[in-house]
Amino acid sequence: MSETPNPRHPDGNPGRRPEDVIETPDTSVDISVEEIADLPPGKMLEVDDVTLRFGGVKALDGVSFHINTGEILGLIGPNGAGKTTCFNVMTGVYQPTSGGVRFMGDPLGKRKKFEITKMGIARTFQNIRLFHNMTALENVLVGADAHHSTGIASALLRLPKHRAEEAEGMDRAHELLKFMGLERRADELARNLPYGDQRRLEIARALATNPKLLCLDEPAAGFNPAEKRRLMELIQTIRDQGYTVLLIEHDMKLVMGVTDRIVVLEFGKKIAEGLPAEIRDNPAVIAAYLGVDESAS
Amino acid sequence: MSAVRNFFHAIRVRLGKLPKWAQILLWALAVLLVYLLPIINPPLLTTTDSDFASVLFSCAMYSLVAIGLNIVIGYAGLLDLGYVGFFAVGAFTVGVLSSAHGSIPLLIAFPIAMAVTLVSGVLLGAPTLRVRGDYLAIVTLGFGEIIRLVLLNTQWLGGASGIANIPSPPSWAIFEIPHITWQGLTAFVDLETTTTFLEFTVVDAVPFYWLALTLVLIVLFLDWLMQNSRVGRAWEATREDEDAAELMGVPTFRFKLLAFATGAAIGGLSGALFATRQGFINPDNFSIIYSVLFVAMVVVGGQGNRWGVVSAAVLLIWLPEKFRFLADGRYLLFGLALMALAIFRPQGLLPPKRSVRAKQAEEEEQEVLEEGTARV
Amino acid sequence: MDLLVNQFWALTITGLAIGAVYALVALGYTLVYGVLRLINFAHSEVFMWGSFAAVWVLMGVGATNASGMGVVGLLVLGFAAAMAASGLIAIGLEFFAYRPLRKRNSPPLIALISAIGASFVLSEAMGLRDKPFAALGLEGLQEYVGRPRENLPLPRLIDAKPVFAVFNYNVTNVDILVIVSALVMMVVLDQFMRRSRLGRGIRAVAQDPEAAALMGVNRDRVIRITFLIGGIMAGGAAMLYLLKIGVTRYNAGFILGVKAFTAAVLGGIGNLRGALLGGFVLGVAENYGSAIFGTEWKDVVAFVLLIVILLFRPTGLLGESLGKARA
């Protein structure tokens, strides 16, 4: 990116301010971790006849699907279909009224949210939920802490384990920031970051927890087409490095282009599941979206 | 307001440019100066109507409280309106162990007091931290009052008369330090008024002040260590967005409990100091008004900022002593100050805590704007 | 335990009497919380100022030697003075301590700080009430403002006389007066909340401020009225408190306020009938507790009950609900 002159400087000398340089994600960075190195192929996550009731409303009604190791699964459906609710059940925010979720064969049960994260499921949010008064780096470090085990005693005494984990966390955080194209903004407060960077930071933070399954909730909302394309390429790179991805997304074109398989929800029920080509031609799906054709976003 | 900010900022930048050894030397000198305050008796700072050393001791003791409560409210975001309860548990543990029902030396009684208070913090926190924010405030307020009422009504703990004859720390008289008195702006060495290093007596508060100050410095350091580790990050993330934090792998409940327990232990330490300095304690010393005062220190100082809360503690203790005529109207003014603060400066006196790197980033941006180049 | 059994009816009825006072003050807490999600820490001082107003006015008209109809007139006067004073203080409180924060969208912790500050200002102002008069050299008002940190007694209006007996306890006229007055006030309030436009407005704002605003409800006005109503109820409670206890002081608000708040939470915060129930339950429980454990533990009962409720049933006995149609 060329340097733009700093108009505020008295003699007009070009000054390179952080916002003047657009940093692009560096996909050459290897962000894979040993947790995802030798995963057995097959079903990583199984949603098993999950029903979730809120009072009289059935947010999810007998939903069943699975995610295979190493694939990008798209979860689509009109607004209010239950996609984010599904995420919430998978990450422990809600307990299903009936049915359950199994991760790597292990039922989630009544595990707490942070325990599920440690099992290997990480997520981003539809409305960005960064730690706004912490820096980008600190946000990612919090994610990295998920797989650390230092306690207060170790921290107070600065034991070797603490120092090792802090160093590892820093390395990992920088690696992820670089991958996402956020390295230069590492020390900026999350709330001061431009929108696109905030979305990418959420992904970096989720990756820092060393997940096996990465769940992205409309990660490209509000992006322009070029940015969306770039983000989708990034997601593919993430998958190529060994992560499994579950993607909620509204933009049909994107979903068709990036996912390996798609699950479609409507009014809390699954109405279709299959390859992108099958879904595109599925009359039930078309009806659900009611005339929204694939080229719109 | 920003002119003052810029002034301090400029000083900090200047100092930051000095070589490391010079910075350390300056810090050491500053610390030494603080230790010598009651000896030097600087004319503007000294309190004429009350013993300066006693006031300084109170400032140090309540600074400890502020640091502890800052962890609970400022770092972890838990509104505790019953902190005086921990203060009382610490004081009475020392009282019971070293006077009422035993004669355990203070060196052992102090850590036991901290441990007991820590346990009480865990016992209080375990059931109540699941409760909604504003309810937590009321529950903790109730706890503080229950402690006081239990102390008042339990004869084994002294009942209404409390516990007396609490020993001072062990003394070891080595040498004497004369104080300095002032006439106008000229200093005189006063050989009559001396402080014996290191003798703890009823008449001279200076060694108590030194003890308290040393504890404050140690705790400040430990606080810094905690803040700059995953513990501090976890607290901050929990305070920012508890659900998101938990989804990012932070065991939020455990860390909230940790904050509560740590804050409690520090409160207990401060209470222990109070007990040994006063020599006698009774339930009146631990009424709810102190809990409110403590919360005010943290809010006024700027929650989350350890220097801010210490400054606020010092100010809230020192000002009424310096301006004694305000003594009766103290709480009225205090109430007015709280209301004014809530409306006009809710973030507190000092800006909220920022990590060192974020501050540096800000300073760099400032420099870039001023000079047009970024420091690499 | 014997004490409890022997004195059961005495404990129950006097418990209901003081519980009535708690209930009326609890209404103020519950109303404000329902509408603003704010714990109005300073409501206890609203109550306290009402009590002083009643005492001062009655002292002023020389109430010591009245009888018959005169007593009724004096009671009405006392109630009026207390309610007016409390109502005014409540509105002032809303205006000075909370409204500026609402305009600034302050976080709840800050509102609590302001509430605490206001509480101090009001109680200390009463505790220092002799100062301005001394400074201005005004003598002669010593009866009213002198010895500011001590109890100020209510002029003797009613001698407690037994009226009828319930088992082994003689219910006094004061007991009856207190309980009946409280019930009357609560019925009036209940009708107001259910039937009047303002009452509906309050419930609407409690349930959904934005929707209410869209429906043309003036939120500021509703909030002001809410504080006013809470204040009036507290004023009524103040008069009843004076009749029962006989004295007031500058910090009479504190303990009573915590107990009233406990009652509000006990019944379900935001729920008016809950406040009623909570008050009576607390008043009676306190008495039973002091009979079993000893009178010095009476106050502890309130705090322990508070903690237990918040831990095990935070929505209270009747559930939170100002917004829902249960008034």
Image: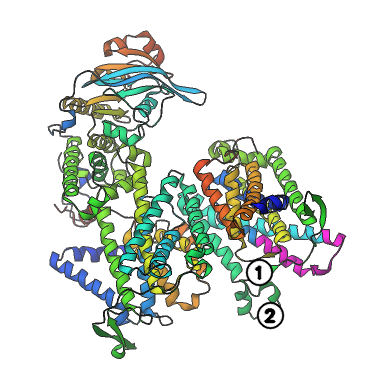
| Secondary structure that dominates the magenta span | helix
Residues drawn in magenta: C49-72
Label 2: few (<14), some (14–19) or many (≥20) C-alpha neighbours in 10 Å: few
- Quick check: A202 above or below C126? above
- Which circle's residue, 1 or 2, is located before the other in the chain? 2
Tag count: 2
- Residue depicted at x 24% and y 66%: B11
Look at 74% across and 57% down and name the residue there.
C79
User: Which residue type carries mark 1?
Assistant: Asn
Residue tagged 1: C151
Membership of C197 in magenta stretch? no
Q: For mark 2, give the secondary structure.
A: loop
In this rendering, the answer to whether A226 lies above or below A3 is above
Q: Gap between marks 1 and 2, in whole Å?
A: 20 Å
Please check whether the numbered discs 1 and 2 fall on a single chain.
yes
Dividing the image into 4 quarters, which one contains the N terminus of chain B? bottom left
Residue C139 marker: 2
* Residue B47 drawn at (x, y percent): 40, 79
Label at residue A232: none
| Above/below status of C237 relative to B99 | above
Secondary structure beneath dot 1 equals loop
Q: Are marks 1 and 2 in contact (CB under 8 Å)?
A: no
Task: State which chain disc 2 sits on.
Answer: C
Quadrant location of residue A117? top left
Q: Is residue B322 left or right of residue B39?
A: right
Q: Is residue A5 visible?
A: no
Of residues C103 and B105, the one drawn nearer to the viewer in this rendering: B105
Packing grade of label 1 (10 A; few <14, some 14-19, many >=20) is: some
Which residue reaches farthest front? C2
Residue C64 painted magenta? yes
